[in-house]
Amino acid sequence: MKTQRKRLPILILLLSLSLLLFGCNTVAATQEPHEDAEKTALARRVSELEATLQAEREASYIRENELATQISELEERLALLTGGAEGEKPEGAAMVFHYTVENGLATVTKYEGAATLVEIPGTLDGYPVTAIGERAFEGNTSIAAVVVPDGVKVINWFAFYGCGSLFDITLPASITSIGHAVFDGCAGPTVTCPKGSYAAEYAKSYGLSCIET
């Protein structure tokens, strides 16, 4: 009887060790498939993100090339209209700007000239130009391109109405208002302006070609 009593605790100890080892192996076996699934999901996500990044790079490259092509085409057309050589002005290219002043700020009210490229000055007799008046350039068929200076906030109704040769206009970020029918009767001008500006939104809403810089 004494021998059996001594063996009983030993058997219990062995049984406990077996259960403990078996239980650990079960947990490990359960964890391994879970870890493998997580690794697979992470690897798949990395592949998806890499593919998305590559697609965005390709789209950006294509967009840059398209813009460069558009700029090149516009420059070629402008060169033809201005007689070829850069800086060379055709005969009759003198530009006269009539304006009014209110509160120390100038509004261009009338343009006279036969230049194909018109760069509106930022100041007239020392007064900052902040607006282009109604019908200021109306009906001038010599104008092919116009550069509006930074500081101009408003382009009023019919400002470039009927400028049949106008195909490019550069607008600044300072523009906050463009009136009705400003470009009606023009040759479908391309608007060059800062990205996200009021001018960009205006061009898109009226279906005009837009180059955002």
Image (spheres, rainbow, N blue to C red):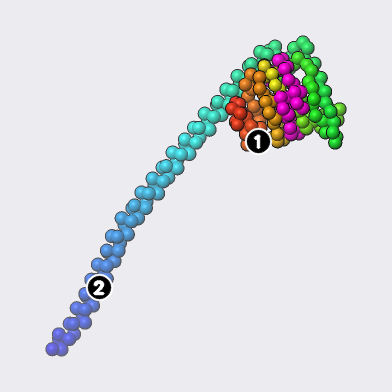
Circle 1: residue type: Ser
Tell me whether the residue at label 2 lies in contact with that at label 1, contact meaning CB atoms closer than 8 angstroms. no
- SS at badge 1: loop
Which residue is most to the bottom?
A: 2
Residue annotated with mark 2: 17
Q: Position of residue 47 (x, y in %)?
A: 41, 42
Q: Quadrant of the N terminus?
A: bottom left
Asked if residue 119 can be seen in this view, the reply is: no
Considering depth in this image, is 102 or 11 the residue closer to the camera?
102
Considering depth in this image, is 165 or 55 the residue closer to the camera?
165
Asked if residue 53 can be seen in this view, the reply is: yes
Label for residue 197?
1
Q: What range is drawn magenta here?
A: 133-159
- SS at badge 2: helix
**Mark 1: few/some/many CA within 10 Å (<14, 14-19, 20+):** some
Query: Which numbered mark, 2 or 1, is in the foreground of this view?
Result: 1
